[in-house]
Amino acid sequence: MRSHRDEYPVLGEAPNIDLPPRSVLYRLEPIGLGTSKRESLVSYLDRLMWAHRVSRFNLKALPGVGAAHEADLRLRDFDRAPAFLAGGVISLRWVTLLEELTTYKGLEALTFAPIARIVNTWRLVARTRRWCPECMSEAMAAGVPYAQLLWHVACVSACPIHQVALEQSCRCGGSPSRLRAAITPGHCPRCGAALADTLRRRKATSQEVQIARIVADLLSEPRWDQGGWCPSDNHTTTFLRAAVDSHFGGKWTRLAKALGVAKSSLHVWMNGHSKPSLPWLVDLARHFECSVVSIVGGCHPTSRSAEGTRVHKRHRRRPKVSAKDRALIAEQLVKILASDTAEPLKKVAHRLDVDPKYLRENFPAEAALIVRRYYDQREAEKHDKRQQWLITVRKRAEELADAGVLPTSRRVLGDDTPPASYRKMRAEINQILAEARRRMATKAS
C-alpha cells in the first residue's frame, strides 16, 4: 500500500517569483504604436477615465496629483489645449504621472515630444479636436474607438488612407469648439451619438492628402517609439545648403522665394539659430518630393517639384467704372440705404461689382452710412440676445429660490456658459442673484 508521501512527492522548495508592482490604474495599452495610426495622449486619457468610470472633472482626485498638476487643471480645457500634446513641460508632467499610475512606459510616444527637440512647436497642435469618419467607423466596428495623434496636427486636414476631410463637429448643431469630456469614447459630447454615424463625409483635395501622407510617414518612424530625435540629430541645415547648391545656383534667396517664406526666416534656419516649424518642413518635403526624416537627416535632395508648394489666391481685377456706371451706382446706393435690411460694405460692393475701396473714395458719405447701419444692427442683435439670455437666467434663479435652494452662479448658469459671456455680464448676473436671494429670504421669513 502506497503511503501519503509516495502519492504526493516533495518537489523541493518553492521558487521565488518576482511579481511586477501593482498599478494604481488599469494598465491600458496604447493603440497603434509603431504605425501612423498611433493613439494620442488625449484619447488614451479618455479611455482610461472611461474604464474607471471617472469624470474628467475629477482628475484632481487621482493619486500623485501635485500642485503643478492642479495648476494645469485650473486652465480651461487643459487636456484639449495644444500644450497637453506639444511635448513641453505640461506634456511630460502628465506623461510621467500616467506612467506611474498605469506602470506602462512609453506614453511619451503618444505626444509630439519625440520631435519637439528639433522643431518649433508653436502652432503645431490644432486647437480643436477632429476625427476621420471612416477611421471612426472602423474603430467602432473593432470595439475600440480612439483618436489618432495624426488628427491633432494643425497642418493636417485630411485622412491619408480614406482621402476624406477631417471633421471637428457633429451634426447635432453644436458649433465647433474645444470639446469637453465625451460621454463614452467615440461619441459626441453634446448629443451622445456615435461620431461614426454623425460625422459628414467630404472628399479631400489632393494637396491635403499629400500633406497628411507626409506627416503620417513621420509618425510611423520607428525612432518615434525609441525616444525621438535629439538636437544633435537635426541636420536640416545640411539639407538646405545642399538644396541651394544643387537646384538654386547657390542663391538661398531664390529658395526662399520658391518656398514662399521670408529671407530672414530662411537665413536663421540655414545658420541653425532657430528651429523650423513642422508645417514648413512639410512644405519643404513637398517641394523636393522627399520625407521629413530625410530633411532632418541631412540627405542630399535628388529631385525638385516643378510647381510651387504654396497656392496663392488670385483676386479678380475689377473693371474700370465709367461715368454712366457711376450714376447707376449712386442710384443703387440710394435704394440700398432706403431699405430696412443693413448689409456690410463688402457685400454691397460685391453686388455693385466694385471694390469697397472704390465706394470709400467716391461715395464716402454713403459708405460711412452703410458701415454705421450694419454696425448698429449687429449691436442691436447682440443686445437683444443678451437680454433674452438674462431673462432665462432670472427665471432659473427665481425657480431655485422658490424651491429653497440658494441661487449661485454655478447653479444658475451651469457648465454651458462661456467665460467670456460671464465676464461681460457679471454685474447684471450678480444683481439677478442678489434679487433672487432677497426673495428667498423674504419668503423664508
Image (cartoon, grey):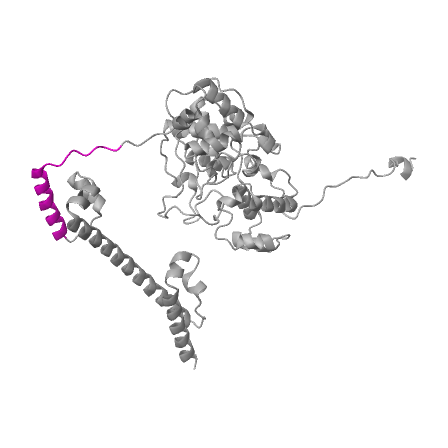
The image quadrant of residue 320 is top left
The image quadrant of residue 206 is top left
The answer to whether residue 93 is magenta is: no
Left or right placement of residue 78 versus residue 167 in this view: right
Number of numbered markers = 0
Q: Position of residue 240 (x, y in %)?
A: 49, 25
State the residue in front, 15 or 420.
420
Residue visible at 86% across and 37% down in the picture? 8
Q: Please determine whether, in this image, residue 400 is positioned above or below residue 40.
A: below
| Magenta part of the chain | 315-339
Residue 160 appears in the rendering? no
Q: Position of residue 421 (x, y in %)?
A: 38, 58
- Residue extending farthest to the bottom is 445
Q: Position of residue 176 (x, y in %)?
A: 38, 46
Overall secondary structure of the magenta stretch?
A: helix
Residue visible at 45% across and 27% down in the picture? 284
State the residue in front, 309 or 232.
232
Q: Position of residue 197 (x, y in %)?
A: 40, 39
Q: Please determine whether, in this image, residue 394 is positioned above or below residue 445.
A: above
Residue visible at 28% across and 60% down in the picture? 383
Residue 40 appears in the rendering? yes
Q: Please determine whether, in this image, residue 224 is positioned above or below residue 368.
A: above
Quarter of the picture containing the C terminus is: bottom left
Left or right placement of residue 5 versus residue 240 in this view: right
Left or right placement of residue 1 versus residue 198 in this view: right
Quarter of the picture containing the N terminus is: top right
Residue visible at 41% across and 49% down in the picture? 190
